[in-house]
Every structure is written in C-alpha cells, then in structure tokens.
Image (tube, coloured by chain):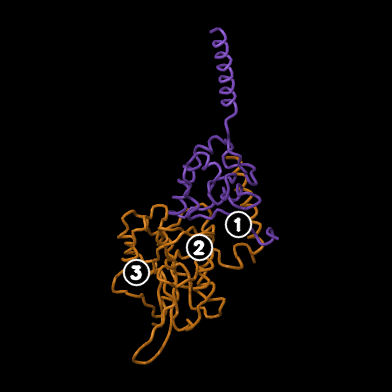
Chain colours: A purple, B orange
Amino acid sequence: MNMALRLAAILFSIFITTAVHAADKPILPNIDIGKGGQCVEPDHALMRKTHMNLLKHQRDETMRKGIRGQKYSLAECVECHASTKTNSVLGSNEAFCQGCHAYAAVKLDCFECHANKRKVTAEASK
Amino acid sequence: MSETNLDRRDFLTKSSIGLAGLAIAPGMLLFDMAHARPLGEAASNKVRWGMLIDNNKCETGCNDCVTACNTENGLSGGTKPTDSQWIRKVQLKDTFTGRVSSLPMMCQHCENPPCVDVCPTQASFKRADGIVLVDKHICIGCRYCVMACPYQARSFVHEVLHDQKPEVPRGKGTVESCTLCVHRIDKGDTTACAEACTKAGHKAILFGDLNDPESEISKRIRTVTSTQIRADLGLNTGVRYEGI
C-alpha cells in the first residue's frame, strides 16, 4: 500500500513537471521572417493580433478611393517578409504567412488573388 | 509613426530632386505632370478619365493594344469563352461601301454604368474619377454585371490563377474587366493600350482627362466628330470613337 502510494506520488510529480515544462515552452511555429527589419508597427504582438484589420481598412481606401502609398500595404508585407530563398510568403509551413496561419488554423484568402511573391528585379535575380 | 514620417520626408526629398533635374526653368517641366495625383490623395471627381479611339488610324490586323493589356494585367491571352478578355479587336465591315476597319473594344467606363446598377453587393462601382471597377473583395461572382453590360466588356474568372501581377490582383470566382490601368493612372502614367498604340506608330488611342478643357483629348473631341457606341442608351461613355 505504502509502496503504491509512493509510486503514485512519483508519477504525479513527473506529470506535473512535464506539464509545467510544456507551459514554459509552447511549441511555436518556426517562421522565416524574410528580410525582416523595422515593421510598420513596432509592437509585434499588435501586428499579430490586428494586421488583418489594418489591411482591411487600407484595402478599402485604396480600392474605392484610390489612396495609395499608405502605411499598411499587403505588397509591403510581402516585400519584407517573403522568404529570401523562395521570394514567397507561401509554399511551406515555415513561410511567413502560411506558417503562422497553418499554426493558428486560420484560412488565408489574400493570396488567391494577390501576388505572394516579392517583385524581383532583373538585376537581383542574376 | 516617426519611422513612417522619415520615410515620407525621404521620399519627398528624393522625388523633388528628381523633378528639379527635369525642370527647364522654374515652374516649367519637360513633360506634363498635371495628371499625377499626389500619393495618398483620394481620386477626385474634378477629373474624368477617358479615351478617344480613332478608327481611321487603327490598323486592321494590329493587335498591339490587346497584347499590351494582357502583359500589363497578367491575362493569359486566350480567347475561349472562359478566358478573360479585357480588350478585344473588333472588325467592322460596311456592307454598302465594303470598307473594312477594326477598333479596340473594352469597358467604356460609363458615367451611368449598368453594371453598377445591377450589382447586388455594390462590388461593381465607379470611382470618383470615372473609372468603373470591381471590388473583388466583395464580388460574389453572380455575373449580373456581365449580363447588364451592353459592350460585353466583363469576364468571369473560372479557374484558379497563379502568379498574378502585384498591382493587378485577380482571382477565381470574381468578375473583372478593363480597369483603365488604374494602377498606372494613379502613378501619372497612361494606359498600357494607349502606350502600345503610340509605340506602334498608329497613335489611335488618346488617353486623357475629359474634364480638363485644356487636355489634348478635350480639345480633340471639341473639334472633331466623335461618337459613343450605343449612345442611345444614354450611358455617357468615357471611351469615345471617331471615324466610325
């Protein structure tokens, strides 16, 4: 009886430690941020949370009113964050957009119409 | 925020240096910059973009405007019923005189566009400067506008597309048509078709601001007879033709 109790206690403590360890280090997607650099909003958590709202507001302004060259732009997202190897924000679960969307299980519609590749100049591709 | 302002300042400085290089004298530039709207400013109804197509100068058999449009907008160039065609060359034959001529046909950018009237989601809309566009974010692909357009200018995208142009987003399940090269106009450029026609030496397509009495297109429509196709519908098209 005593032995069984002790065994249970040991098992329980192992379980607790692993649980605590798991909480310490959540499994995050391994994302290729491309060129990276200074983002339009310095707060990364804010960008993760609200990038779709920023883009949606901007898209209506551009589409309906023709206001271009503003702060938030999908093309600029792609410009900075497309993988330096593939020039795309899609293609693998490490790609900037696809990687995070696959991780969060959120459907990504933008690139059914919009270009997912960085514009490569003739000189850069040489 | 400060980061953006710096970029903006940087941009303005650089562009003004560029402009200074092109100035012949203070206040005079080598080319007409009047059309370029400042970046970040909304399109205004003071401007109405249009084109004048001279049927006499349009060469039968020349397809340069169509090719230029396809290249500019990333269209396949196919002519099957399910392929997108934003501009087509149409051949006309006068059965009495036997005269054969051709003209390019595309979205006529009507002042009173029937496609906008019928759109159930308001995806089809007219921008302040007269350009008729489809907001593909809210287009449900019902194709009422395709039916309503008297010029058969609209196409439906039937298949999944890849490698679209960054400036010209296109996708399956939405309707599309000539955008009057809106991404070029916003930069102060002319349309791809007009550019190609001039390059080919025909100069049959004249692009400009119909509201500006001093623009080349306004002067031309003031002095020569030009017609709207299906003028009886009272749509007041932005694209006009002369010599038909």
Q: Secondary structure at mark 1?
A: loop
Which residue is tagged 3? B236
Kindly indicate whether the residue at mark 3 contacts the one at mark 2 (C-beta within 8 angstroms): no
Both labels 2 and 1 in a single chain: no
Label 1 resides on the chain identified as A
Q: Amino acid at mark 3?
A: Asn
Tell me if mark 1 has few (under 14), some (14-19) or many (20+) residues whose alpha carbon lies within 10 angstroms of its own. Answer: some
- Asked if residue B130 can be seen in this view, the reply is no
Q: Amino acid at mark 1?
A: Lys
Q: Position of residue B63 (x, y in %)?
A: 50, 78
Using a 10 Å C-alpha cutoff, classify the residue at mark 2 as few (fewer than 14 neighbours), some (14 to 19) or many (20 or more). Answer: some
Choose the circle earlier in sequence order: 2 or 3.
Answer: 2
Q: Which mark is residue A119?
A: 1
> Closer to the observer: label 2 or label 1?
1
On the same chain: label 3 and label 1? no
Q: Nearer the viewer, residue A115 or B190?
A: A115
The x, y position of residue A39, in whole percent, is: 60, 42
Residue that label 2 marks:
B185
Image position of B78 with respect to B101: above or below? above
Chain of residue at mark 2: B
Q: Which amino acid does the dot numbered 2 rest on? A: Ile
Left/right of residue A95 with respect to residue A104 in the rendered view = right
